[in-house]
Amino acid sequence: MIGAITLMMASGCAAAETPHPAREEQRSSAPNEPCNDLVDTRAAAPSPPGPTSSGGIYIGTGDTFFMGTQGRRWGDNVEFYAGAFHMKVGIHTLDSHPPRVSAIRSDGRATGTAEFAHDEAQRFPGTLPPGITFPTTGCWKVEARGTTGFATIEVNVQAPQPSPAS
């Protein structure tokens, strides 16, 4: 599957967003609650669908799982370039086609996109590394939904910190 899939879904995470100087952004009306994007074993699947590396865990149910490293934060993988925030995340599917991926900012005012590369979309069942793009900072709920299961994570997208002067 080539191209971007527009992402839309309801969200429950809430956090104030941090404006990025390169973008004019809408302010969140959501309460100032923390965005829980910790990769935590309490959310791990009780029966992983495959082998895990040291510290690796699967989060999800049925045929669809996010892959993360215990103790890290999902937002650790976010980078800012080309005027938006981007991340790759492992999604493991037991299905014969890619899951539907959706993302929405906690205040419901912005949606992200996901893109599967053509060659990656041909390996099923297996692990896919879709690229997810967030247009703004804030707390984002990302969901991958397969035929018999789904996986949901929160991603705290923060403005990049300026580099210290040399």
Image (spheres, grey):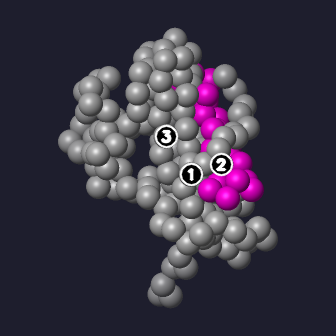
- Kindly report the distance in space between the C-alpha atoms of the residues bearing marks 2 and 1: 10 Å
Mark found first going from the N terminus, 2 or 1: 1
Image point (57%, 61%), residue name: 14
> Is the residue marked by circle 3 packed among few (<14), some (14-19), or many (20+) residues within 10 Å?
many
Mark found first going from the N terminus, 3 or 2: 2
What amino acid is labelled 1 in the image?
A: Gly
Q: In terms of secondary structure, where does tag 3 sit?
A: strand
Can residue 122 be seen here? The reply is no
Q: Assess whether mark 1 and mark 2 are in contact (beta carbons under 8 angstroms).
A: no
Q: Does 75 appear in magenta?
A: no
Q: In terms of secondary structure, where does tag 2 sit?
A: strand
Mark 3 lies on residue = 152
What amino acid is labelled 3 in the image?
A: Thr
- Kindly report the distance in space between the C-alpha atoms of the residues bearing marks 3 and 2: 12 Å
Residue 5 locus on image (x, y percent): 71, 34
> Is the residue marked by circle 2 packed among few (<14), some (14-19), or many (20+) residues within 10 Å?
many
Mark 1 lies on residue = 12
- Kindly report the distance in space between the C-alpha atoms of the residues bearing marks 3 and 1: 11 Å
The stretch in magenta equals 100-121
> Is the residue marked by circle 1 packed among few (<14), some (14-19), or many (20+) residues within 10 Å?
some
Mark 2 lies on residue = 104
Q: Quadrant of residue 90?
A: top left
Image point (76%, 68%), residue name: 25
Residue 76 locus on image (x, y percent): 44, 58
Image point (49%, 40%), residue name: 152
Image point (32%, 23%), residue name: 49
Can residue 106 be seen here? The reply is yes
